[in-house]
Image: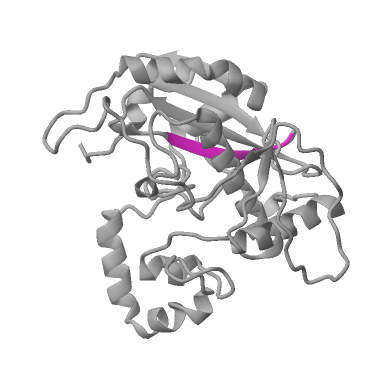
Amino acid sequence: MECSWDSDNTITAMNDEARNSLRVIGLQLDSDQYPHVYNGGVVQPGDAAIVTSTPGEDMNNVKRKQARSATGSRQRAARRQRTSGQPGPPGQAPQLICASLRETYEAELDALRDAYPGTKIWQQAEGMWLLSESSVLPGLDKTATFLTAIPFSPQFLQKSWGFWITPVYWEWIGPRHTNFGDGSICAFDPKDDTWRPGDSLITLLDLYTLWALRHEHLKMLGRWPGRQAVPHTYERLSESHPDELCGCNRNGKRYAECCQPHDQARPLGDSFFQFMKFTQGQLDRSPPRAICEFIKCRQAPPPIKDFLASLNGH
């Protein structure tokens, strides 16, 4: 069975309230102001006022019940110290199971089901799969579905894939800010301490929800909102828009005012060669067939051990 979709033939309907919310959230993200996420993965603008391009325009008041801050990359304080379960030194084989980490995740499952109702959970020896739905924006005609692999070892990274779902079609969310090789979500840099193994699963899904909203902003309004990490010249040239914040993430400037002139002056072949070295020649960014088959058929998910990515590169 082929894993395929035709995003050019899909149509997104959005009412005026949703479009206005999307625009305001994008402006806030550009100013490092992060929105609230409500139960069900509903995103609303944050409390801070912003200067809009339409004087006098105001958002409808929204009830602030059970709101969470969808913080972005590089916004979190220093990582708390952990006395156990740390990745081992280079050369040491990763452990597939950490009982305390498993207990930490299992203790949050009831709260997770409250925050993301309808979440389905499959437990396997090496970890658990989460299938969660996020409304993203009131008035949007589709929902975001995340299939997330949560390892029971801090030496392995979590992985998740996002899909837009409607009653008549499903569509992978990408390719911007997805990982090369398997098209999994790249919502934050693991080195930034935005989320680490053992942190809240609700926070992780909130980050994925905000990532999906950024994709909708890109599709509907033509640009990726807020800070982003795009450190490689070829990737910036291929994907970054001039009016987006620059992917070098150094000074808060737009790409056109920051790295774009320097990137365009470099020989394209050299940039591509360096980028190929970084990706180890893996330029494909589509989900594995087993992931697509599960999203389509909703039967048993594949073995989680097939998708583990070690923090130590093993």
Q: Which color scheme does this rendered protein use?
A: one colour
Image location (x, y in percent) of residue 175: 51, 53
Q: Nearer the viewer, residue 193 or 243?
A: 193
Residue 162 is a magenta residue: yes
Report which quarter residue 277 is drawn in.
Answer: bottom left
- Residue furthest left in the image: 91
Q: Is residue 149 above or below residue 21?
A: above
Q: Residue at x 51, y 74 (%)?
A: 253
User: In the visual, does 305 lie left or right of 172?
Assistant: left
Q: Nearer the viewer, residue 204 or 136?
A: 204
Q: Nearer the viewer, residue 75 or 114?
A: 75
Can residue 126 be seen here? The reply is no
User: In the visual, does 266 lie left or right of 11?
Assistant: left
Can residue 67 be seen here? The reply is yes
Q: Nearer the viewer, residue 302 or 244?
A: 244
User: In the visual, does 163 lie left or right of 272?
Assistant: right
Count of number-bearing discs: 0
Image location (x, y in percent) of residue 130: 52, 24
Image location (x, y in percent) of residue 186: 45, 47
| Quarter of the C terminus within the rendering | top left
Q: Residue at x 64, y 31 (%)?
A: 133
The residue segment tinted magenta is 159-166
Q: Is residue 13 above or below residue 256?
A: above
Image location (x, y in percent) of residue 250: 42, 68
Residue 80 is a magenta residue: no
Q: Residue at x 44, y 14 (%)?
A: 123
Q: Is residue 149 above or below residue 103?
A: below
Report which quarter residue 308 is drawn in.
Answer: top left
Q: Main secondary structure of the magenta part?
A: strand
Report which quarter residue 264 is drawn in.
Answer: bottom left
Q: Is residue 120 above or below residue 136?
A: above
Q: Residue at x 42, y 62 (%)?
A: 230
